[in-house]
Image (cartoon, rainbow, N blue to C red):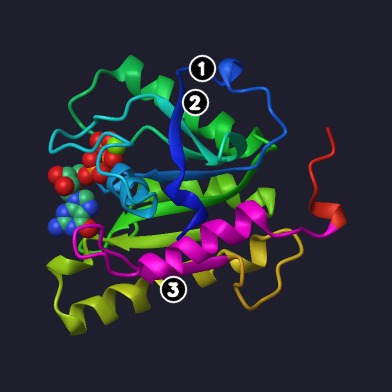
Amino acid sequence: MSKLFQARFATTVNDTHCLPATPLREVAFAGRSNAGKSSAINVLCNQKRLAFSSKTPGRTQHINYFGIFAKDDLLAYLVDLPGYGYAAVNRETKYHWNDLLSDYLQEREQLVGMVLIVDSRRGITDLDEQMIKWFVPTGKPIHILLSKCDKLNKSECKHSLDAVRKQLQQYDPVLPGGTGDSKKLTAQLFSSTKRIGLEEANNIVIKWLFEAKAPEDEITS
Ligand SMILES: Nc1nc2c(ncn2[C@@H]2O[C@H](COP(=O)(O)OP(=O)(O)OP(=O)(O)O)[C@@H](O)[C@H]2O)c(=O)[nH]1
Ligand SMILES: [Mg+2]
């Protein structure tokens, strides 16, 4: 049983000043509106409606925190970020999302890695690249879930994964202390509905949240 199965809703915030004051690690799920962020969190936590998922794009408009528990001990958080790229919102809301996401991704020390959900049929879009560009300078890892791969045939899946891995390589030299082998920039195929790639995604999130890190990577404040 995955440690993620004992997840519970914790809090919702709409402003980076209101983020939980906690030393616990957190992993964020980012992606375009409708890409499948909430569905991925639900399936990884083995729950149907932990994170609300919906056919209506733009459903998750706030930052939602889910606590990972062991009995009653709170161990870590999963964070569902507001989806971006949803056309039918006003300019003010777009600016708000932009500020919220850029501040959060660049400055949140407790954040140990970003899971970026990218629709496997669509590939990395300009807005996804913006997320990557904000996050890469932090030196923290990014793992891309190529979602909804149940909608693609085998060769389309391979093509989608190859293309995204190739695109990710270009960011490796920009990583602080970049290794040249892109260990911090990874991707996989994923389907929430068909439960494809679940174990691989689960292992990455668990590793980020619970494995000991090098001392120089630890949160200092
Ligand atoms: N076929 C298929 N559909 C999926 C998959 N994952 C999500 N969906 C569907 O895609 C739609 C959007 O999923 P959500 O998980 O709500 O997407 P989101 O990224 O949280 O969207 P926002 O909250 O709007 O940012 C829903 O209708 C889901 O049922 C998948 O793996 N396969
Ligand atoms: Mg959502």
Q: Which label belongs to residue 165? A: 3
| Marks 2/1: CA–CA distance | 7 Å
Q: Residue 41, image x and y in percent? A: 37, 47
Mark found first going from the N terminus, 2 or 1: 1
- SS type, badge 2: helix
Label 3 crowding class (10 Å Cα cut-off): few <14, some 14-19, many 20+? some
Residue 160 quadrant: bottom left
Q: Is residue 62 left or right of residue 70?
A: left
Q: Which label belongs to residue 100? A: 2
Q: Which residues are magenta?
A: 185-214
Is residue 85 visible in this depiction of the protein? no
Residue holding disc 1:
15
Residue lying at 27% horizontally and 47% vertically, measured from the top left: 39
Q: Residue 117, image x and y in percent? A: 36, 53
- SS type, badge 1: loop
User: CB under 8 Å between callouts 2 and 1?
Assistant: yes
| Residue 40 in magenta stretch | no
Mark found first going from the N terminus, 3 or 1: 1
Mark found first going from the N terminus, 3 or 2: 2
In this rendering, which labeled residue sits more in front, label 3 or label 1? 1
Where 218 falls versus 204 (above or below)? above
In this rendering, which labeled residue sits more in front, label 2 or label 1? 1
Residue lying at 17% horizontally and 36% vertically, measured from the top left: 54
User: CB under 8 Å between callouts 3 and 2?
Assistant: no
Query: Which image quarter holds the N terminus?
Result: bottom left
Where 24 falls versus 151 (above or below)? above
